[in-house]
Image (cartoon, grey):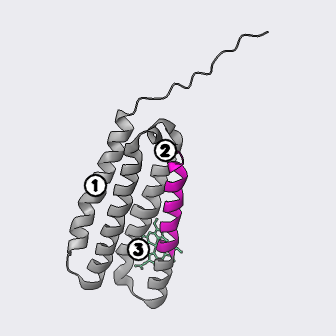
Amino acid sequence: MRNIDKVYVATGFGWLVLAAGFGTWLGASGHFNFAQSHAHIGLLGFVASVIFGLAHRGWPELRERTLATVQFAVYEVGTMILLAGKVMVDATGEPNLLLMTGSPIVILGVILFLWLFLASPARKNTPELVPAE
Ligand code: HEM
C-alpha cells in the first residue's frame, strides 16, 4: 500500500479521539476502574499506530512489500479485539476470551513489523549524477 504511512497515522489519530473521549467520560463520571483500558487505547492504539506510520515514512522501502498491508491488518484487528477484552476485564474483573485472543494477535503484529523492518533491503538513496552540458 503506497500510502500506508498516512493510513497508519490517521488510524492512530482515530484511536486518540477514542482514548480522549473515553478518558473524558471516565473522569467526568468517576468510572476510574476503566483507567487502564483508557491508557491501553492511548498507548496500543494511538502511540503505537503513529510510530508504525512514522517508521513507514522514514523507511519507504517497507511499504513496497505486501507484508506491510498484512501487518497493518493483523496489528489493528488484534488491537481492536484486545482493547474490547481489556474494557471487559475492567468492567468485570475477570479475564475473557477477547483478551486472550487479541493479545497473541497483537504480539504477532509486532513480530511481523520487526520481520518487515529487518528483512527489507534498504533503498539506495544516492542521487543520480547528471553530466553538465
Ligand atoms: C482528552 C484526553 C484525555 C483525558 C480527558 C484523560 C483522562 C484520564 C483520566 C480521568 C485518568 C484516570 C486518572 C486517575 O485514575 O486518577 C487517566 C489515566 C491515564 N491516562 Fe488519560 N486522558 C486523556 C488522554 C490520554 C492519552 C492520549 C494517553 C496515552 C497516550 C493517556 C494515558 C493515560 C494513562 C497511562 C493513565 C493511567 C492509567 C492507570 O492509572 O491505570 N491518557 N486519563
Question: Closer to the camera, 13 or 73?
Answer: 73
Quick check: 122 left or right of 71? Answer: right
Q: What residue did someone put label 3 on?
A: 38
Q: Quadrant of ligand 1?
A: bottom left
In reply to whether residue 81 is colored magenta, the answer given is no
Seen in the picture, residue 54 relative to 15 is either above or below; the reply is above
Quick check: 65 left or right of 131? Answer: left
Task: Say which residue appears at 34% left-offset and 56% top-offset.
Answer: 74
Do labels 3 and 2 touch, CB within 8 Å?
A: no
Question: Closer to the camera, 80 or 64?
Answer: 64
Mark 3 or mark 1: name the one nearer the start of the chain. Answer: 3
Mark 3 or mark 2: name the one nearer the start of the chain. Answer: 3
Seen in the picture, residue 72 relative to 129 is either above or below; the reply is below
Q: Residue 41 at what x, y percent from top left? A: 41, 69
User: Does the numbered disc 3 mark a residue whose Cβ is under 8 Å from ligand 1?
Assistant: yes
Disc 2, SS: helix
Report the amino acid beneath label 1. Answer: Ile
Q: Nearer the viewer, mark 3 or mark 1?
A: 1
Quadrant for the C terminus, please.
top right
Callout 3: 10 Å neighbours few (<14), some, many (20+)? many
User: What span is colored magenta in the figure?
Assistant: 1-20
User: Does the numbered disc 1 mark a residue whose Cβ is under 8 Å from ligand 1?
Assistant: no
Magenta part, dominant SS? helix
Alpha carbon distance from label 3 to label 2: 26 Å
Question: Looking at this rendering, what residue extends furthest in the right direction?
Answer: 133
Task: Say which residue appears at 27% left-offset and 65% top-offset.
Answer: 102
Disc 3, SS: helix
Q: What residue did someone put label 2 on?
A: 56
In reply to whether residue 18 is colored magenta, the answer given is yes
